[in-house]
Image: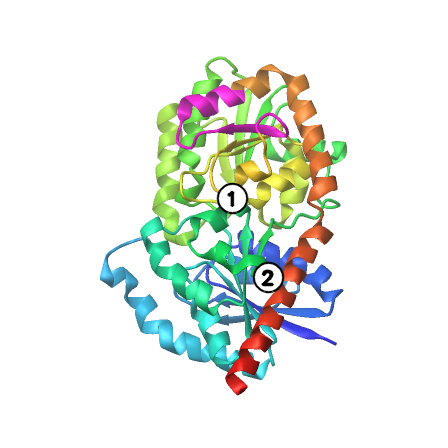
Amino acid sequence: MTRRLLSVIHGPVFGGGFNQLVQLRHPLEGHGWKTTAVATSEPGNAVGRLREEGVDTVVMPLHRLRASPDPRIQAPFLAGFRPEVRALRRLIRERQIDLVQAHGDTNPHAAIAAHLEGVAVVWQLYDTRTPPPLRRVTMPMVTRIADAITTWGQELARVHPGTESLGERHVVVFPPVDADRFRPDAERRRSARLELGIPDDAFLLGAVGVRNPTKGYEWLARGLAEARRTHPAIQARVLGSPSPVHAAYEQSVLNEVSALGIGDIFEMRDGGSRVPELMPGFDALVLSSVSRSEGIPTVILEAMACGIPVISTDVGAVREILRPGEAGLLVPPEDTGALAGAIGVLVGDPARAKEMGHRGRGLVEERYRLERCAERHLRAYELALEHRARRSSRHAG
């Protein structure tokens, strides 16, 4: 029997949620689930990337709450809410959807539409961007409507009030990574470093992620500038899609790079779908995300799969997969000295860096294979369907 999954993601730029959809689509299909994506008509690269991957994609207006108290900025969200929920309800009926997956506690449109149509809801929480006071407002609605909740890591359940009260209907998941696509590869390493303009004797710090403020690229630049004083052979490349609404932030980072005098060794470019080919060129991955930003960034597991050591800020649920000193190093967020020090540790001890990378690959093989990730989502879907069926029976009675 074929079941139909509708995954609704409000962001316009291809990121973790979209990557999850793409990576899990085929494994889920093997278990009888057919996926349709709904993406916003707001300018960005998400729709193009989804269709490039062959994902059945519906585009419609989908507004989001913004990180601003200005009512003029929130006006499109408020004005569009009812018509966008109506449009999603129509789509659920037309496509005969069995389960809807909503993403983020501040994006309730899909969950409400599914609930009104009597369709099961899995609500996914994959970051910590929502301010804690706002979570106390949004989470009672999430826990009331959701038939199951998935979180990227246990920590996200702890910081989103009420999630753990769902018991077994709360399922901890992790980002999906295809360990066959992301792997250690000497030839890819040579080709990637040539393309990225990295000399053989340079130590390349790589970062991957959308160019927005949560990624803290200004902190990467500052850490790089400080570490370079004692390790002059360091270079950095950021592979990330530009975010149209954060163009001013990106320019501010580039201005700081120039002021720090590291414009010759710090470069941003759009890696697009070629990250698996370019990542093996890194000597270390750096995640410089700020406080209240991440859940478990997909890129950490991708780097581990490639046998690359990781330096990450201790945010979200990162330490649940990156134990200090095992496959990489953890540093406090927004701490230039700590980040520079961690960079210096890996640059100054290549044998230790190599061993961390080797352990990271082993952990992915042991714990984080794509098939295991799919199994956890399938468990959440089955729990949601069962809970929705019980709800329907009570209402019918």
Q: Indicate whether 76 appears above or below 329.
A: below
The answer to whether residue 89 is left or right of residue 347 is left
Estimate the x, y position of residue 205 in percent, counting from the top left: 56, 29
**Residue 279 falls in image quadrant:** top right
Residue at 47 percent of width and 22 percent of height: 340
Ranked by sequence position, the earlier of labels 1 and 2 is 2
Residue at 53 percent of width and 18 percent of height: 344
Q: Indicate whether 115 appears above or below 357.
A: below
The stretch drawn in magenta includes residue 132: no
Amino acid type of disc 2? Leu
Residue topped by disc 2: 50
Q: CA distance from mark 1 to mark 2?
A: 17 Å
Residue topped by disc 1: 209
In front here: 257 or 23?
23
Residue at 40 percent of width and 27 percent of height: 335
* Secondary structure of residue under mark 2: helix
